[in-house]
Amino acid sequence: MGGKATPSSLKRWSRSRSIAGLGVVGLAAGAFAMLNAGGSPAAAATIDATVPTTCTIPVAGAESYDAKISATIPDRAVVGDTVQLLNFSISIVLNVATTDALQILGATTLEGSITAGATLTNASPSDLSIVATVPVTPVPQTQDENGDGPEFTITATGPSPTATLTSAGTAVLTATTVNAVFNPKNAAGTSVLPAAKQIIPCKFNAGDNLVLASIPVSSNTVHDPTPTTAPPTPVLDFPTPTPVPPTPRGTPIPVNQHVVLSGPTSAAAEATPFTYTATAQLPVGHISFYDGTTLLGTSTAPNGISTTFTGTFYLNSGTHNLIATTESWNGLDYGGRDNVSNTLTVVIASVLPTPQPTPVPPTPTPVGDLAPYSVSVQLIGPSTVELGSPATYTATALYTSGPRSGQPLGTSITYVDDATGATLCYTSGSCAVTFPTVGVTHHVHADVANTFTCCVSSGDPGHGPATSNIVDTRVVPVATPSPTPAPNLTHIDFSATGTIGLPTVNGTGKVGPGTISTDVNLKGGSFTGTSSIPDITVNASLFGFIPTTIVSSFTQVGLLTGQLAAGATDVTADLKANLGVKSVKALGVLPLTSGNCTTASPVSIHLASNGKGEFSPFTGGTLSSKFAIGKLANCGALTDLLNAIFPGNANTLTLKLATKG
């Protein structure tokens, strides 16, 4: 047949190979969706690629990911073929930082899409792209002891574009661009990211090999040459051969004792395995062992045929008549069990009960010479101990004879270190000792001294000496504590504008624009930060009728601290600041003030959103506070006057935060 193959001919693909290439943060579907020959038969090749990429995730920041891509493509084609990726999928492992960020936002599911671009040489179009769909995927809600959520995987799939091969040579597929849209949602099905923040910018890591595959392209468009009719094969007339009668097979040769059976013929007791050996005169495949007409077992030659076979059996008490039978190596039939060994008569005795020794009564102790009571000592202690820490040993001493058998001695015990010969303790309680050298093993035992008194005829004769077991204790270095994992922080900047109210001077003023910079801990939503607020001009009315203009400075002291609520839709923050008075104008007059005029102690300000879920770390929101101002200091001649009018507990601060970038 001539011409191009139809798409159905692709079913004849037969071989496969592995092509290393690109993986993208979920993200490179289009780069792989274009390579499956649609016009000519070809062998299937497999893309199995992993390529790192970096994406900037809201809250988490720039994160590195690995994407694993699998698909099938042709490994050869011809000019004019269309090529397309088949059966592709992209699996991306989202790391711990991403899970933490999604948990902070209150996300329970993640869905979206991945758009990727690639170029294909020797083809039209040469610029290709695909949009792969990320289905609804559950976001893990568990956390480990460090407050981290687990990694989890998303998989994207989607239809692929096609390209037509335009020239012979090598068509090279190279990944170029990648982006994603991630839409995390909470349990109510509401997106927790603004639409603008769902667009995830990504890029391939510098230095990665982004060539995904190469396809040899041939200019030959004829794959199945038209068959030609072969000339008829001449028919040759060979003479019919004269049948040759078969060579008669040999007459079976009777064999007497063709198999010899040997082994033990008696035993003192049953329940013991007995091994028997059967030796055949000719190589055979197997031999069967019988007890009379009862089959005991069959032994098969490990290499096909053999002359020697063994069998191991348990024989009950009594008399047994053992034989072995076989078939010949050349298949001759010796007539059932004619190939029988000698009979081996085996006599097995019954198992007799073990005779119990006749108990010997103890020799009574002569009156006037009582024996000492016996005792036992058991020692417990550590197998290892850190340098500088005490090793504690406890010995238990008990009577094992006499009227006090089972009772403790209640006496002092000597603890001895066999490694040094030193006595560690002499005490009726536990022994705690600190060893000085790392790497040394100490062998510790406990001794009970003899208290027996000779020739006691009545009363308590005392007890004999006793030594415990040995406890080996090795001194090891102090273990280095595992470092606490560093928090995974993401940086968010907010612009800050708002108002301040000073009711003691009937004044209000505009705040900002300033900046609030925060570092959010993704493990639990806590954050720290700094504020930069320009000087604040307050328009006031002293005593209710004197127009006054006050210029105040705002200087943060220490770090701002705060906490995002679950779902990150509300926030609280605490900071301390010194409020300075730089100038005061009353009726247009500028009294002289010191440049160091400020609050004597920092002002504590607690800011909070309204609790209605209207805050977002991606857009911002409004925070407010009611705070107290105390005494001022270093204000020169105006110190007493300012302290008469400024301090108060009902001051207000409202800040409207807007996320930068």
Image: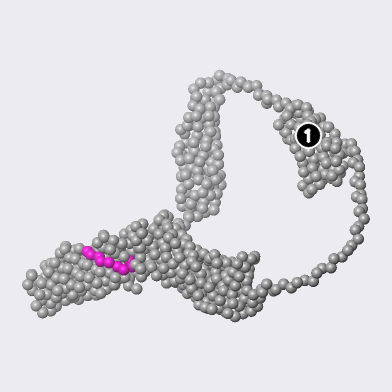
- The residue that appears at 8% across and 70% down in the rendered structure is 544
Q: Is residue 621 magenta?
A: yes
* Residue nearest the observer in this picture, 376 or 657: 657
- For the view shown, which residue lies furthest in the top direction? 367
- The residue that appears at 46% across and 69% down in the rendered structure is 131
- The residue that appears at 56% across and 22% down in the rendered structure is 369
- Decide if residue 431 is on the left or right side of residue 249: left
Pinpoint residue 533: horizontal percent, then vertical percent. 25, 73
Is residue 25 visible in the rendered image? The answer is no
- Decide if residue 626 is on the left or right side of residue 484: left
Pinpoint residue 48: horizontal percent, then vertical percent. 56, 66
Q: Quadrant of residue 133?
A: bottom left
Pinpoint residue 363: horizontal percent, then vertical percent. 61, 21
- For the view shown, which residue lies furthest in the bottom direction? 167
- Decide if residue 510 is on the left or right side of residue 17: left
Question: What residue is pinned by disc 1?
Answer: 290
Question: Relative to residue 252, is residue 127 depicted above or below?
Answer: below
**Residues in magenta, as a range:** 617-625
* Residue nearest the observer in this picture, 581 or 98: 98
* Residue nearest the observer in this picture, 323 or 558: 323
Q: Secondary structure at mark 1?
A: strand
Q: Quadrant of the N terminus?
A: bottom right
- The residue that appears at 44% across and 62% down in the rendered structure is 135
Amino acid under disc 1: Tyr
Is residue 79 visible in the rendered image? The answer is yes
Pinpoint residue 574: horizontal percent, then vertical percent. 27, 63
* Residue nearest the observer in this picture, 330 or 412: 330
